[in-house]
Image (tube, grey):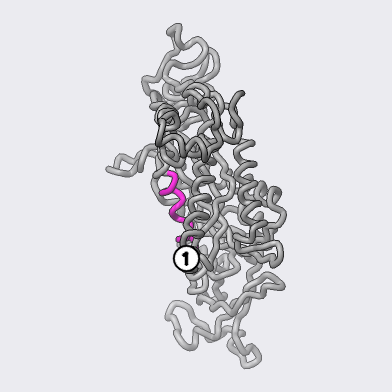
Amino acid sequence: MPYDPVSMYLLSLFRCSGHLSRLEVVRLLRQRKEGQWLRSQLGFTGPVPSEAGLRYFENQITPQLQQEINALQVDALYRAGLLPTQPEAPLAVSLTFDGMLHEARSRMRCSSVRDSCYQPAPRPCPVRQRDKQGCDCSQETCAKRCRYTTPRDPAARLISYTGNNKHPRPSPNTATKKTGQKGSRGRLVYGYYSYAGQLLDEELATYWLLPTSFAPATTGDRALFPRTFTDLQARFPWLMIREVMADAGVGYANCLDLIWQAGALRLVDIVGAQGDTDPAVQLDRGYDERGHPLCPRGYLLHPNGHDYGRRRTKWRCRKRCRQQPHPERPSLDCPFLAPEHKHGYTTTVGRTHHDGNIRLAREIPYGSPAWQARYRQRNAAESRNGILQHLGLKRLPVHGLDRGHVVVLQGELVANLNTLVRLVRQASQLLA
């Protein structure tokens, strides 16, 4: 009181879209001429709020409330027929998932801070446990928590970002061990990690951001994807998913099974594991590091199309050993060269390979032209991180996990609004 909450919320969004501080936006609102138009658009007919009043209002917005506001925006776009799937003509859509690291507002004071560092003394010191100096927590300031923690950002964590998640690690954001080589640690980031789903619109070559998950920076895609994916399915029952595109951070059984259960194609990059490139291991299990099946003699099979009804891909050798014989792979005694086997050795890949491996099982052959044509659609959603950085959210302007989650969600709400405005302008120019 006495301000309308809708006006206050619009003022908060305006501040986010312009990357303005509270003091700057209040000063702009109070200007006699320039602020008159802004006050009329936001619905302020009387006095305008102070900086402290705006801060109080923004602190009342919880992540759950802001997530629902973002979800209502997507519902409104769906009812208006602006999404690829519409109430009158429901279609299966493509989803892509990606994450972004956000630096905490607090400056890091200890690289090894953990939850235990916020417990009352005596407490274990993760630094001293590694035979380093650390903190003995003997000072009075350490009674309730270690003096090297960041109490306003207790959930912030330090990670080493390497930009590569195809190795056997949970996420590209997982800290790597220092090997002593220059540049081996990657980029150090102390803060949080946002993980977002995007609904792709192939016809308009654009995307719509869906409500985002938010966690400490050390939380990987493997942990965030199941929660994000199931929440989207529960919140948007009209969402029929045709395919899911993601990088190798999602290439694990707990994530791939969820996509399979949704009836969608798993266009997920492959995460590597030890032994994948060993020819002996490949021949023993019957498929290579890309999940492409091999014949018993070790020759690579050819994909023969995907059966969408039975949800399996058929592979056959086409008697390749006769066309391109390998000296170390004799095939004279192969029974599948007989005339009754027209296409030679054949096999199928469904949810898993024949040995139960799901990590390397895909409906569309990984790396094939069909795969590349579909996976290339992710490029339409690569600007999400750039938009948030333009809005000043690469380093968060607020403290704490919950407040950081709210401002990131507001930034994505603004991004969807900007997409809508751009499409309206383009359509108006075509009509003119």
| Viewer can see residue 109 | yes
Among all residues in the image, which is located at the extreme top?
A: 140
Query: Residue at 61% of width from left, 85% of height from top?
Result: 336
Residue 263 is situated, as x and y percent measured from the top left of the image, at: 68, 62
Q: Is residue 383 magenta?
A: yes
Left or right of residue 68: residue 325? left
What is the span of residues highlighted in magenta in the rendered image? 377-388
- Residue linked to disc 1: 376
- SS type, badge 1: helix
Up-down: is 228 above or below 103?
Answer: below
Foreground of the two, 332 or 351: 351
Q: How many marks?
A: 1
Residue type at numbered disc 1: Arg
Q: Residue at x 38, y 27 (%)?
A: 107
Task: From the top left corner, tell me how far across and down residue 247 is, in percent.
Answer: 50, 55
Q: Is residue 84 left or right of residue 152?
A: right
Instruction: Farthest residue to the left: give it.
Output: 182
Q: Can residue 289 be seen?
A: no
From the viewer's side, name the closer residue of 184 and 222: 222
Image x and y of residue 355, in percent: 64, 63
Main SS, magenta residues:
helix
**Which residue of the protein is positioned furthest toward the bottom in this rendering?**
339
Q: Position of residue 213 (x, y in %)?
A: 57, 42
Q: Residue at x 50, y 64 (%)?
A: 427
Label 1 crowd (10 A; few <14 / some 14-19 / many >=20): few
The residue sitting at 53% across, 37% down in the picture is: 42
Residue 268 belongs to the span the image colors magenta = no
Q: Which residue is at the front of the view, 289 or 255?
A: 255
Q: Quadrant of the N terminus?
A: top right
Is 4 situated left or right of 118 in this image? right
| Residue farthest to the front, as pictured | 33
